[in-house]
Every structure is written in structure tokens, then in C-alpha cells.
Amino acid sequence: MTTKRQRAVLKELTLLVPQAPYADSEPIRSAALSAHLRHLPPSIAVWLSIVAYIRHTYTDYDKLRDDGYDKDSARFFVIDDINEKLTEWRATRFVDVDEKL
């Protein structure tokens, strides 16, 4: 049985990144449904999950952090990589340099 929130998350995921492969969309969907994001509207929970997933899976963010960069600096250096993956997935939204994610 699918809950209203699960349906809303799936809808938002499809709207935000319609060409994301299933292998990528499933971990994003799961993260968006996690308890620590439950207080957020589905659209925000999905967006934060998408960006975090791409950041940790498709960029050098974790390596930058391991090399001693603080969180904000490491995030700044991977914005272009995140937006490139979002473009590949035909995203309807992109990360802005001034956005705190």
C-alpha cells in the first residue's frame, strides 16, 4: 500500500529529474522518505535528497572533505559537477552558487 507522502515524493522526483535512472532514483526516493526529512514538504525533501545524492555519488565532495576542506568550500567546488548531472537527468531546477544546501 502506498501512502499519500510516498506518492507525492515519487511525483516530485519525476517532475524534478525526469531522466534520472532507476538505480539513482530509488536511493533518492528512499532518502526523501526518511524520518529526518518527514517534517518538510515533499518537494523540498526530494530536492535536498537529489542534491545530497549527486554530491556524494558523482562528485569529489567526500575527497575534498577528506583533504581538509570545510563543508561550504567543498560544496562550492562541486556545484558545476552537480549541475552537470542535473542537466544529464533533464532537471527542472539547478543548484545556485548562493543556495545553501
Image: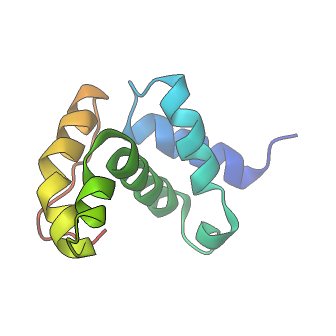
> Which residue occupies the extreme front position in the image?
67
Q: Residue 46 at x, y = what percent?
A: 49, 53
Counting from the top left corner in percent of width and height, residue 33 is at 65, 56
* Residue beneath the point at 26% across and 47% down: 93
Tell me what residue is drawn at x 59 percent, y 48 percent: 9
Image vertical order of residue 14 relative to residue 42, above or below:
above
Residue 17 in the image, given as x and y percentages of width and height: 38, 35
Q: Position of residue 75 (x, y in %)?
A: 22, 63
Asked whether, in this view, residue 17 is left or right of residue 91, the answer is: right
Vertical side of 57 occupied by 65: above or below: below
Please identify the quadrant where the C terminus is shown. bottom left
Q: Which of the 4 image quarters holds residue 96?
A: bottom left
Relative to 58, 15 lies left or right: right
Counting the numbered discs, the total is 0
Where is 38 relative to 25, above or below?
A: below
Q: 70 or 47, which lies in front? A: 70
> What residue sits 55% from the left and 71% below the top?
40
Quarter the N terminus occupies = top right
* Residue located 43% across and 48% down the image: 53
Q: Nearer the viewer, residue 70 or 96?
A: 70
